[in-house]
Image (cartoon, helix red, strand yellow):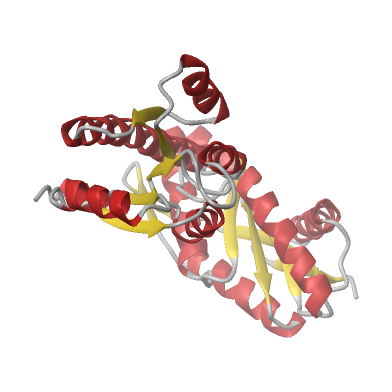
Amino acid sequence: MNALASQYEILVVDDSPVYRKLIEHILSADGYSLSFACSGSEALRAHHQKSPDIVITDWVMPDFSGLELCQHIRADKSSSYTYVILMTSNTEKDGVVKGLEAGADDYLVKPFDSNEMVARIGVGRRIIELHRQLERKGAELEEVARTDSLTGLPNRRAIEEWASKQLKGASRHGFPLWVVLGDIDSFKGINDSFGHLAGDIVLRTFADTLKKGTRQSDMCGRLGGDEFLLVISHVSAENIEMTINRFREQFSSLSFPFVGRSVSVTATFGVAGSETGDLKEFETLVRRADEMLYEAKRAGRNCVRLAKLL
């Protein structure tokens, strides 16, 4: 029995119990995970529920043809790629061409040789594995595109996508939502005095401070430069100010050993949001939080300023 074969789900579609049993006998020896359907409609339901890797389907069935089943499978973009083998007693080239045009990847002529079926399934496995690799690589690239490389936090794109969903939820269910901008005080001076490597250490440390104090239901990310953004929900105005002050105090209590000196760094925060969830678009909240940030800077830095919109 092939242990790798068990990783592949195969759906066999044929209204003939004889052929279903024959295919089960051929493929179960290799350890494939098999399921069966007797009609096109039953196969379609099974495809939606199980998303099989490979479908082996007869051309002629009681309700609709294997050709139509191929077309339905190819029209479904919600699942991973399914490799389709069409079984037919039609050896005419026109029939084969129609099957391939409908979305079949391969075909078998009935009655088929068992070794040929196993070999064609092997081809299907190789194609499915290539698709899996492409999907994994695509997911990795997508993650890279949504992540700040220096801090490992979500970047602006990821923040905006997540925040827009939270905004809709707050508006629908009326829960509090806050946008928080955090900015490291005199960051340019750190780079100028101690170098960019020291600046990177400060940025990563600030990111870690925010990340450790952020609940899984909330988000913190880096907008760029020394500016960070948090989206926090289900917290009252009084408690949000306490929460952000806790971030501020934790960060300011740290000491950085730069060039033989112990250096303290502070951060300033601006907060904007609502306790009722009746909010405008995300960019409006960011602008208001930015205004609060600059107000806090003008007040002497290392502090928090909050704007409650409603």
Tell me which residue sits at (77%, 72%) in the image: 170
Q: Looking at this view, is 170 or 37 the one in front?
A: 37
Left or right: where 251 falls relative to 283: left
Tell me which residue sits at (9%, 51%) in the image: 1
Count the marks.
Answer: 0
x and y percent of residue 214 in the render? Answer: 53, 69
Work out whether 28 lies above or below 124. Answer: below
x and y percent of residue 249 in the render? Answer: 54, 71
Looking at the rendering, which quadrant does residue 127 occupy? top left
Tell me which residue sits at (80%, 60%) in the image: 292
x and y percent of residue 7 in the render? Answer: 25, 51
Q: Looking at this view, is 55 or 231 the one in front?
A: 55
Query: Is residue 186 among the parts visible in the rendering?
Result: no
Left or right: where 240 falls relative to 19: right
x and y percent of residue 229 in the render? Answer: 65, 55
Q: Looking at this view, is 31 or 202 the one in front?
A: 31
Query: Is residue 58 among the parts visible in the rendering?
Result: yes
Q: Looking at this view, is 125 or 29 the one in front?
A: 29
Work out whether 271 lies above or below 103. Answer: below
Residue at the farthest left position: 1
Quadrant (top left/top right/bottom left/bottom right) for the C terminus: bottom right
Looking at the rendering, which quadrant does residue 224 occupy? top right
Looking at the rendering, which quadrant does residue 128 occupy? top left
Left or right: where 101 falls relative to 121: right
